[in-house]
Structure formats: structure tokens, C-alpha cells
Amino acid sequence: MKDKKIVVIGGGTGTYSVLSGLKHYTDQLTAIVTMADSGGSAKKERDDWGLLPSSDIRKSLIALADISTEDNLILRELFQYRYSEGKGISGITFGNLFLIALTKLLKSQDKAIEKAGEILKIKGRVLPVTLSQIDLVAKYADGTEVVGEHFIDEPHHNGTIAISQLYTRPKAEITEKAKEAIMDADIIIIGPGGFYTTILANFVIQGVAEAVKKSKAKKIFILNLMTEYGQTYGFTAYRFLSELDRYFPVDNLDYVVINKTALPESVLKRYHKYRAEPVLNDIPKNQPYKIIEADLLSPDIIKHQKGDTLRRSLIRHNPEKVALTCMRLVGLV
């Protein structure tokens, strides 16, 4: 098991959950993370320091961090600490500021990410999907064009209108390291996460879909728990897959995993305010991939973190349940 190479493609809290569970099974983990973030501290990193956004990188580093000693646990918590006061730094995490400073010292963001991984003693590695400065662009069915991941994720426009096309401006290519990781993988896990802003944000990078398609790895797609206003309003499970197919051919998937556990009524009421609903399984039978329904739900209700200005999910996938489900699928437990 320790020799099996697993690649997780995504970013944000979805990838955080998957990595947190998988690190108990293997050290051969690679997180390939979107670089399209533009909200919160990412805007400051891009505008003030001319750097690629590091929040999704930080989350993956934290997920893979060693917590076997008290010192390591404190270091991990330090990377998660978010300032709630202080002009210019309120809302930014210590981990982001650390990565910025390390980039300036090493004169390379790529090397800074690698060094941060060494400091946190991570099990695996974290790779940016591209090292190009990009903006994520969504074109909607009514012809509207929205520039920036943050404005797609938290829309100021009519979020019920479907996205007809997603791309980056300018075009960007996958890094050689990310490409090699995908080609060498034994297992590739896609999602969960913001469907357009986290998952497809990777697949619109030139070379990603091609590498995943060519890879001989077993491929698993984990569906989201909830729809999102502005991205996937009104989506069912099959609609997610039909849309994914426009950017990556789903007949290359081996498994599609979907949660079967009902969400608490109290959580559904809160989500209703955001026009979000549970993703229902309406996938027709006789698909080229195997459909797996499992209990993937975390019982924890996510609390708002002081100083955080962004809207976050209220409930998430359980890391242990997701990891165990994936490992069973490929016969590794």
C-alpha cells in the first residue's frame, strides 16, 4: 500500500478532507492544486506582492502535515491561524504570510511550497497545477462574462443562470511536475470542491485533461454534497457528470462516488438561505463507470472563523469515510 501513488486534483476544503483521510494509508500522495483563487487574501497576494494565490496550497499542506508530536501539532495550528485584527492583515492566515515571506527569501514560489512541506513534515507533496498568473473566466448562458474565481464563487449576478463556458485568461499550461505526477499515478481522485472554481479550474489548464486521460491510474470522481448558487444551481448528479464531460471525458472514469446519507434538517434550512440543495443521484444505469453510494458525511457543523470574510461550506465530507471508500474501491484495504 505504501508504494501506491495517489494524486488528488482539486483545491480548497474538499481536497483538504480527502488528503486528511488518505495520509493514514500512504506516504505517496500528491495534491495538484488550482491557482485560480482570487478572493480574500488571494487578491492581496496577487495585487500587492505579484504572487500566485497560496490559500489552496496552504490547506493541502496543512492536511498532509505531520501531527505526531505536540510541536508538530502547534506548527500546524499556527499555519491555520487567521488574523482577525490589524490593518492590512485582518483575514489573512499566518500560513499565507509565511509562504509569502518564504517565496521572497527563496526567490521562487515553487521552492517555497516545497520547503514549507519539509518544515511541516508532510506526507506527500503539494504541486500547483500551473505557475502562470491567470484569471478564471466564466461565460454564462445569457452572454454575461464574469472574470475572477471569487466573483464566480460568490456572484453579484443572477446565480441561477448556467455557466456555458469556463476558461482562463491568459491560457496556461500544466507544470511538468504536475504532469509527471498524473502520468505516474496508480490512483487519481478528482474532487470534491467548488465544481467550476476548484475542480474544472484545473481541467481548463492546458495539458491536464490529456494527462489524466492518458494515465493508466484508476480514476475516481467524488461528487459534491450540495449544489452552489452561481456555479451549480439546480444540478443533479448526472448534470455534474454531463458538465464534467465537456472538459474531461467521463468514460475515462472508473468510479463515481456520491454521498447517500441525509443531511440534518437544521443544516438544510441554513443552506436554503444560500439557494443550495443536496446533490441527488439521478445517474442512469449502464454507465461506463461504476456508481458508488456511500455514507460520506461528516457529523461536524463548520463554525465561522473569526476574521474570515469568505462564505464557507457548512458541512463537509468525512475524511476517514472518504479515504476508506476510495481504498476499498481499488482493493487496497
Image (cartoon, grey):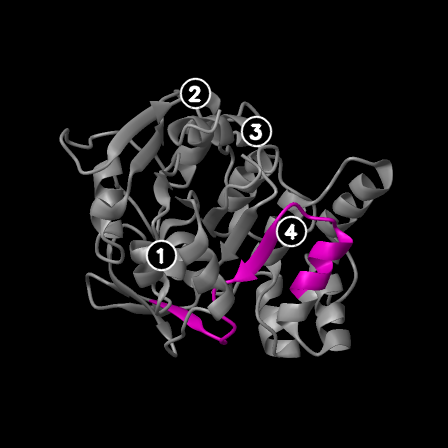
> Residue 55 occupies which quadrant of the picture?
bottom right
> Label 4, on which residue?
61
Residue type at tag 1: Leu
> Label 1, on which residue?
200
Residue at the image position 54 percent from the left and 23 percent from the top: 299
In the picture, the disc for residue 301 is: 3
Q: Are marks 4 and 1 in contact (CB under 8 Å)?
A: no
Residue 130 spot, x, y in % from top left: 48, 69
Q: Using the image as rendered, state which of residue 210 and residue 144 is in the foreground.
A: 210
Mark 2 and mark 1 lie on one chain; the one further toward the N terminus is 1
Residue at the image position 35 percent from the left and 38 percent from the top: 223
Mark 4 and mark 3 lie on one chain; the one further toward the N terminus is 4
Q: Are marks 3 and 1 in contact (CB under 8 Å)?
A: no
Residue 49 spot, x, y in % from top left: 66, 77
Q: Given this view, does label 2 or label 1 mark the residue nearer the observer?
A: 1
Residue 199 spot, x, y in % from top left: 39, 53
The residues bearing labels 3 and 2 have C-alpha atoms spaced at a distance of 12 Å
